[in-house]
Image (cartoon, helix red, strand yellow):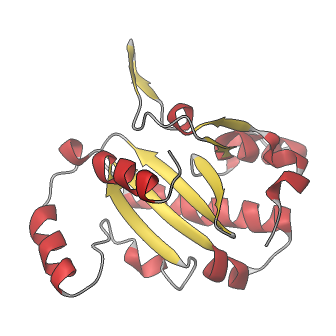
Amino acid sequence: MICLDAYSIFENKSTLRETSKDDSQPGVVQFMTSSNLEVINFDEVKRKYANSLGLPENCAASVDAVIPYGGGVLFVEFKNGRVDNRNIKDKIRDSLLIFLGIIQKDIEYSREKIDFILVYNQEKNPSRIDIGNYVMHKANDELVLFDLKRYKKLYFRNVHTYSQKTFEAYLLSKGLV
């Protein structure tokens, strides 16, 4: 197991609530979780990493939070608006490359130790989730939306897509609240 505290760049901490903040609309601030769990603010890690290379922070995309958990790592991306697959895929790729470069590991480490979670606003991304969840439950599988299931085994140990409510239940079930 890797101790992320050994890397000074991972000292960029925030609460999970703060990393879920959406202030994209003038005068409106929304949070996608109320969890005060301390996490690595990966947007800040990416910024410092890019700047250390003499590059602007917009040269790469990043997930919002990284959480060391149970001998592995959770990458968490919050999406309060409509989910844009291209944007999510860019965040996955860039975040993995930056993270693995910092800890000097290869993709095999990611396949064994890193899970990806997309937390989305269900109201802004309507679909037939209830039907899909029912079918997947019967098949003893989990519904993964937005064409992200392809990244399980390719890049990550597991991939999850959770509504805000389901994410809160996930945090509670893992003792991460």
Vertical relation: 174 (above or below) 8: below
Q: Position of residue 47 (x, y in %)?
A: 74, 41
Disc tally is 0
Name the foreground residue: 98 vs 41.
41
Q: What residue appears at the point 23 percent right and 48 percent down from the top-left corner?
A: 122
Residue at figure coordinates x 86%, y 71% from the top left? 104
Q: Position of residue 35 (x, y in %)?
A: 49, 37
Residue 123 as seen in the image, left or right of residue 55: left
Image quadrant containing the N terminus? bottom right
Q: Position of residue 159 (x, y in %)?
A: 45, 71
Identify the image quadrant of residue 138: bottom left
The answer to whether 160 appears left or right of 133 in the picture is right
Q: Residue at x 49, y 59 (%)?
A: 174
In the rendered view, tell whether residue 78 sits above or below residue 170.
Answer: above
The residue at the point 42 percent across, 38 percent down is 33
Q: In terms of image quadrants, where is residue 123?
A: top left
Asked whether the viewer can see residue 128, the reply is no
Q: Quadrant of residue 25?
A: top left
Indicate the position of residue 39 as horizontal and vertical percent values.
65, 44
Q: Is residue 132 left or right of residue 98?
A: left
- Do we see residue 57 in this rendering? yes
